[in-house]
Amino acid sequence: MPGAQEAVARTERRVARRALDREILRLAVPALGALVAEPLFLLTDTAMVGHLGAVPLAGVGVAGVVLQTAIGLLVFLAYATTPTVARRLGAGDRTGAVRAGIDGIWTALLLGVVLALVGAVTARPLLSLFDTTPAVVDAATTYLTVSLVGVPAMLVVVAATGLLRGLQDTRTPLVVATVGFAANAGLNAVFLYLLGWGVAGSAAGTVVAQWGMAAVYVVIAVRAARAADARLRPGLAGLGRVVRSGAWLLVRNASLRVAMIATVSAAAGLGVTGLATVQIALTLFATLAFALDALAVAAQAMVGHALGAGDAARVRAVTRRLVTFGLLAGAALGLLLALLAPVLAPVFSSDEGVRDLLPGVVLAMAVGVPLAGFVFVLDGVLLGAGDARYLALAGVANVAVYLPLLWWAGAAGAGAVGLWLVFGLGYVGARAVTLGLRAAGSRWQVTGAS
């Protein structure tokens, strides 16, 4: 009977959709907690150093910009590792999957050591480029120099997180990140207040916590390698693969950073009030990004695994469902922002000008957040497919579209609200077009273990 068969088919689709939803949430919810951990390190440092005075606080702020930029550019270590591990796992090659993760960890360690050595030599000259006082430069140099000791550990943590995500495990990174954050806060309190080490103590507490997290991940990786009979020594082919893939992702990450820096630069032309308002808006947007990035992490793990298994139909189903999740999450966050717009200003500023401007900017942001949900999810889907070259070239194209729009907004005197609309709809919209066009095709759906 056609009617009965149709009802059975609907039931089967509903059951399959619910199973897919459970898998997405199983990966995305723990990922959200782990994503918040690293920014919490810096927030903890900032909050505790704030009690030492304005100069130490300013120094941590300046050094933090340098550290965040470096780590933001090198986060490709996770993005390059996750899809490779997931693909090989999906293809039934757990040994190869773990080996790819081990190669990623070795690459992270080597890059971290090089970055720390280069940073130790260039820290003061680099920080002196900031338009600030010699006392702030001294504090920033102290904080950055000590923090550089923890950079190799920080990058090992990033790469090891990519290994576990590829193995479809986002719970372990959450546990490690939570314990690491608690240890960081406790160590900072001891070094800052009990031992009186000042800015150096704050950085030292974070360094110890980072190396502790890295040690835990190394133990986990060694156990996984032994269980899968995978080698622990680095392989030149594996290191080369991570670097090649990472080079494209570095271009992608750099394009994102250029867009953010250009936005801040344009906001500086609005005066102190406009710049402060846009800076608050960017902080809010970054906070929302954590929720949307959790879906992107699920996309990377699930898409890579399905492509490795040669299941193109599942890739399409996962993509459709994640896009739905992204749009719904974006709509919910946008609605929340719109409701909170009238009351957020007093929380972030006591300046009357900022309080007047911020509600309008927040409402403009709320309009574009669903589009951001679409973008973050598709970005994760294509990252999971290992489509790094396209993402890099699309990133450059997006910036090429955005910069003239940004110039036009400044020339037209669009103000803080207009500037945010150009960012939230113009730049994010350009990303939506380039990602949407790619996802609509099938060239990125390359199945197999590599």
Image (cartoon, rainbow, N blue to C red):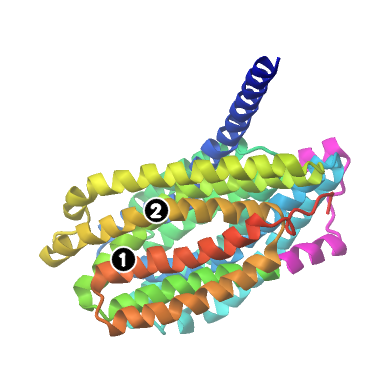
Q: Which residue is mark 1?
A: 279
Image spot of residue 329 (x, y percent):
44, 43
- Name the residue: 26% across, 48% down: 338
- Name the residue: 65% across, 22% down: 6
Does the segment drawn in magenta span residue 366?
A: no
Image spot of residue 179 (x, y percent):
51, 39
- Mark 1, other Cα within 10 Å: few <14 / some 14–19 / many ≥20: some
Who is closer to the viewer here, 299 or 351? Answer: 299
CA distance separating discs 2 and 1: 17 Å
- Name the residue: 69% across, 19% down: 2
Q: Which numbered disc, 2 or 1, marks the residue that appears first in the sequence?
A: 1
- Mark 2, other Cα within 10 Å: few <14 / some 14–19 / many ≥20: many
Taking the image as shown, residue 150 lies to the left or right of residue 402, namely right
The correct choice, above or below, for 238 with respect to 25 in the image is below
Q: Which residue is mark 2?
A: 369
* Quarter of the N terminus within the rendering: top right
For residue 35, say whether it is visible: yes
The range drawn in magenta is 221-245
